[in-house]
Structures are given as C-alpha cells and as structure tokens.
Amino acid sequence: MSSGRVSRHARVRTTAAAAAVCALSAALLAPQASAADTPLHSETYRPQFHFTPEKNWMNDPNGLVYYKGEYHLFYQYNPDGNSWGDMSWGHAVSTDLVHWQQLPLALSHDDKEMVFSGSAVVDENNTTGFGTKKNPPMVAIYTSHNKTTGIQSQALAYSTDRGRTWTKYQGSPVIDIGSRDFRDPKVQWYAPTKSWLMTVSLSAEHKVRFYSSKNLKDWTQLSEFGPSGATGGVWECPDLFPLAVDGDTNNIKWVLVVNINPGGIAGGSAAQYFIGDFDGTKFTAEDNGTYTPPAGAVVQDFEGTDFGAWTATATAFGPGPAAGTLDEQQTVSGFDGKGLANSFHSGDATTGTLTSPSFTVNSPYLNFKIGGGRHPHQPANLLADFDGGSYGDWTTTGDAFGPAPATGTLPGQQQVSGFQGSGLANTFLNGDATTGTLASPEFTIVKRYVNFLIGGGNHPAGSPHPTALELLVDGQVVRSATGKDAEALETASWDVHDLAGKKAQIRVVDDNTGGWGHINADQIVLSDTQAQPGAQETAVNLIVDGQVVRSATGSDSEMLDWASFSTRPYLGKKAQIQLVDMNTGGWGHILADQFTAADSPALSVLQRANWADYGKDFYAAVSWENAPGGKRYMIGWMSNWDYAGAVPTSPWRGAQSIPRQMALRTVDGRVRLTSEPVSSVKSLRQSSPATAGAGIVTNTSKALAGPAAAGKALDIEATFSLKDAERFGLKVRTGTSGEETVISYDTTTQELYVDRTHSGAVDFNSTFPGIQTAPLKAANGKIKLRILVDWSSVEVFGGGGEAVITDQIFPDPASQEVQVFAENGSVKLDKATVWRLDSTHN
C-alpha cells in the first residue's frame, strides 16, 4: 500500500478527519479569542502582510496572471467552512504583490464538480473567441473534479470584465483521459510556435505531461517528463518557465517546478524543481550524474551468513541477513552487495529489534542505506525501558520483580508479546504467588503525556489487591492503569498537562496472589504527543547513554536510499545502532544496509534533489504569467498537508507566502533557483529601525537594543562574520515563557536552520514541532540573512536567496523580542537592522 496513490480529494478528506481531534485540542489550548469578539484582521495569529481570506479555508494559489495593472491571485477556497471541502476559486487582486483586495468568489463548485487548481491567461489574440481583439478574455484553465466518479479533467472558464465575473465553458472538459490523478494545468503562451503550452501533472505516476493548443480548446499531447528526483508522494501543481542564468539573456535555462506531497525535504509537502532545456516539445533536465557516497570504515554491511555480534530479538529480522526480496514482498532494490537487514520475515505481522554491539564513536558521520515503512521514532523523555539488564536507580520491594527485568516470557507463563527491546517489568516470577513494588526516582513532569506499555492482570488501583501502574504526586496516586487479563502489552497514555512542573514518581504494584496476579510494563516515557495504539516505529536509531539521539525511517518504499547521522556531538562516547520494527500494519517493516563511519554525510535522493524552499510550509508554488519587465514572481501556500487542517486559526485557515522574485544563479559551479522577497515589502518598513553595529558575541544570547528591535511583524537584515562558534544567529518571537523561534547557522554542517520546537502552540500535530535545515556555504567568510517575521510565520532567506526556509509559528502575542546568540564559541555580528512592518490591512 502506498500513501502516494491517494487522490487529492480523498487524501485531504482523510487528513482533515485525522486532524479533527488535534484541531479541537489546539483550539482549546491556543491563546485565540473567539472570532465573534475579535475585529477582523486583528485575531491572534492573523498575518499582517501575507494574504489570507477574511474567513474560511484556503490552500493552493491558482490562476496567477497580470493584466491591466493588477496581479490576480485566485486560490483554492471553501466558501462554506474552515476546513477543506467544496473546492472553488477565491479571488484577490493587488497592484504591488503586497496589498491585496479580496474580491467575490470567482469559480464556484456545483452539484457536478469541484473546481481544483489551475492557471489563467489573457487571450490577447482572442484565440478562443470568448472575447474580442479589443477586449480579450481572461481564461481560467482548471481541473474539474467530478463529484460522482472522481475523474479529474481539464476545463475552461472565461471573463471579459478583468476577472470580476466568470462563465464556465459549456464545451468542457477540453482534456479528459479518464484519470483520477490528472490535475493542476499551468498554461502559457509559447511564442516560438504561436501556440498555448500546458504543463499538467499525472500525479500518481510522478510524471508531468505537456500539451499544445492553438485555441485553448483543442489540445495535442507533446511529451512527458518523469519520474525523476523526489518521488515519495504525489506530484502536483507543476510550473514551467524560462530564466536567464546570472542575468545573462544569452544563457536561458528552463525551470520545471513540481510540488510533492508527502515526501518533501522537511517532511510532508514541498516544492522541488528541475533545471534544463525546453525545445517546444520536450523538457530535458540537466544530468547531475551518478552519486558516489563518501568513503569510510564499514561498520556493518550484512554480507555474512549471520548477524555476527549484532543481537536480534523476536522474529522480524530472521536468523540472518536477507539476500534481497522475501516471500510476498515487493521487489527490494538499492542495497549493496548480496545481503541486507530486512524485517519483512513472515510479512508485516512480525516485530523485533536488531542491535549492534557497543562501539566508540570516532567519526563525525554514520552513513547507511534505509528503506521500508515510514513510521518514525517519536522522541520522548524515557523514564524506563528495562533494557539495561538491571533496574538502575528504580527501587524494589518484595520478591515479585526479581533482581533484574525479565527478558520476555517467564517459566510457566503464557507467551508475552508487545514489549519493546530486550526487557520489561514482569511480576510472574515464580508464578502469581509473589508480590512487590517497583518505584522510579522522583522526576519533574515536563511533557503533556506519560505513555507506556501495559499488560497482565486486571486488578485496578484502589481494589483490595491491585496489579497496576501508578503515577504519584505528593505521595498520592493521581493516575493509574491496569492490565486486561492478557500477557500482550498494549499502548496506554495519561494526559498530565494539569500536573506540569510538579514532582512525580512512577510505581509498578503487584499486590495480588490470585489468578492473573501479576503486571507487565515497559517503555514508560514522557512525551509531547499521545501514544497511539497499533502503529509503532520502523526505524534505525542511534543510542547513546541509553537514549535515542538520532533516528531515521523509511519512506514506504522497498528501494533503499542513503541516510546519515551527524555523530560529531558524540565523538569519544559509546553508542549502539538499533534497527526497530514494532509495527504490524501496512509497511510495518524496515530495511537497512551498509553502515559506514565517514568524515562527511551521505546524501539521500531527497537531499540531492533541488528545492525551492526547505521549510515545512511552502507548497503548491506557482508563478505569475505576464509580469511586467519579464520578471518571474512565485508564491506558495504557506502550510503543509501534514497538519493544515489542525492549525489553530479562526475564522480563516490558510495563508499565502510572501511573493518572491525568482532567479537562476551559479552557486558552487552549479545553477540554482534562488528567491528573494518581492521588493515592495520594503514599502511596509517603518522609519527609525533598530540597528546593532559590529560586535563579538560569545557563548551567549542577548536581546537587540531599541524599541524597534521587537515586534510581531518584522523585516530583519543581518550579516555575520565566522569565527569559531559552532552555531549562531537570531532568535525571534521570544518570550518569558521560554518561547523562541531559532534562526541559526551551523558551521559544522554548513546548514541554515529554523527550530520551531518552542515557538508557541506546537502540540496540535506531532509533525509540527521540529528543525528544518537548508545547505548554505559562507561567502567570503560571511553569512547574510534576510528574515520576514509575521504574526504566524517566519521566512528566512540565506545568502541572497540561495537557501530559503518558510515555517508557520503560533507564538503568544506577548513574545516579541529579537535576540542574537552564539554557541560553543564566538561570532562577529557585522550589522543587524530590524524594521517594524506596517500592516497591509490598515
């Protein structure tokens, strides 16, 4: 099964349904005033210089065209609510790409169709006959989604009054190939052949198809491109346009943008691109050549007949390395040599782990190949996993728990299953006759949930003789759980948000000597996300000091791809590699091969692909046609299908990025697509900015001085000169509660990154908090940053637009400070200038 083969309408309906509970909890937690009590455009998270509809759901930008002094922005819109559905085209216009006027609904859904994404052109020569030569029509080319059949075909609508009113063409569809995954036409006038050129996506096939027409009604297929680059999700919203390389109009390259979901560089949705040539019929991408990973010392290549010193638990990995594809498995490819670790033994129903011996980390990177299911490890504060051969600093009473954790089923016990790793707490020692307790050291509740695995007898806390797991605060039992008279451990969770900051203790109690008079417990963790029963991780983990410090997962593919862990922080420490398959559902297995200690990282297909933006929130990116001066402006939907239906905004949901001027520049000998904010953003800058002059910043974080150096809508320019700091940069939207969005450069990895882990409301979806990175090399020893901060977003442009990261954030309105910082050394701040920005709603 592949999540990449779900059509858009089915996918987003599923996403919206799955997010409903998250959205509800986020709405209760966020500092959001009710829509009825809040003036329009002053709601807690309302962007002040990014386009948002006054109310209701918005996603992809559509129909981007310039005509008679106006930039037209159409967009996917639900006129009937604040979640995805009833897709139609909303409409807004601007004279400067910054100040927008929302207009009435342009193209509405009806009983037969939803109006999916597409483009618009000005038919100057009236090739359609929809207007006249004196009053040429504006023509929208959109995907018509048939509500009955799910078929997606290409349709037309036209306007003769500058896009204010529209008529659907009764001869639609103009292209129908009977597909449910054929969408998002981008149309332009191609002057050399005096014809219209359509670029449209065969989404599930990871292909883009090109068509030609003389009148926008009758189309001839020209060619196809793909699969290529990143193919981990459906391909959507393609765009094709020419640009001069380094401003040289004698050196024109063509850019093909293909948006992908899921499978983006930062997870979920993203905009990738290809650079090449278009000859009027066919797009040919430049050949980047074959990839050779960095050389290094092989740690494990699975070429032996057994796992050697590596230890397997349970049965998922079998008795030794697999020779390739196992019974009933799709074809496995991409591994090296003749063997690999493959946990598909007996299908996805089996679970288990495969763990390396302890080794000393002596190289800055651990490279490996990985495939299989996409079920990531969920970071958490581990209280106990009972895998270390002892109870550590937990204390026991009585004799039920024995001197050390059990390694599985005890003598006379039915088969125990569902525990993780090599051990668990199991009080069946000498049968049900023994009793006792096992208590943790005191800890502080710093996460919202306590997650755990539990099995054994059903004797709740409070009954005369309990078999229970208990949470104690001030010596009192405040939460408890018990088994279900079954040896299989199941996932359970306590919501402890009301106990945040309190000192607590976990106690496992067996006070029962009758039938089912024992308890099984494992994997007790503090976590920001609630453990879900069923789906568990399929991952490769690096373990240091008993904690998972690095983790990678597959991409729901049987093709192995390179991955890399940065191990620099753990040099000299003891570590273990652990392959984990705790999943019995679809894609419930993991593949791994070729673990190599190296001095530089291996790059995955995702990392080797080209990305217009490395953040989590830049998708469905397309560009304007007919822009003055031949300029190419691009805009993207500022969200991600992973959590778009759960973001805590009301009465609207969805924002567009700042429009960007695109260019092709040669960077390190390679042509790259770069972007910078449209110049009219500077018109919003208030006078009297805050300026920080040259100075050395060493191992500290300090606020920039001046009243202008704080706010919720800012434009920041900063230049740093490298010294010996490992990381440095700026923190924005910081507050007294520890809120901060960190914008930093890592000199050890030569990466720009944005960390929104503590940026405010982050717990409405488990994939939202995290760190996004983009490759960026210093130029002449300097790092230049341009940062746009709005009430619910940051857009970071590094190195003049070589590296761009766009992320939504949802901080408390009181978090407004800007800080400069350096870690593990010093950096020179050459200059930082902070402008407050006026609202475009004034």
Image: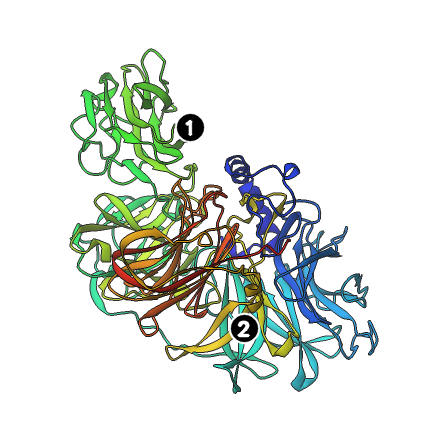
Q: What amino acid does circle 2 point to?
A: Leu
**Residue 711 visible in the picture:** yes
Residue 76 falls in which quadrant of the image? bottom right
524 or 145: nearer the viewer? 524
Q: Position of residue 501 (x, y in %)?
A: 35, 31
Q: Given the current orientation, which residue lies at the most extreme bottom position?
A: 250
Task: Give the side of residue 355 with respect to residue 203, left or right.
Answer: left
Q: What amino acid does circle 1 point to?
A: Asp
Residue that carries the numbered disc 1 in the rendered image: 498
Q: Given the current orientation, which residue lies at the most extreme top position?
A: 464
Earlier-in-chain disc, 2 versus 1:
2
Q: Position of residue 562 (x, y in %)?
A: 34, 63
Residue that carries the numbered disc 2 in the rendered image: 256
Classify mark 2: residues with Cα within 10 Å, few (<14), some (14-19) or many (20+).
Answer: many
Task: Give the side of residue 726 with respect to residue 284, left or right.
Answer: left
Q: Is residue 236 above or below residue 441?
A: below
Q: Position of residue 462 (x, y in %)?
A: 36, 14
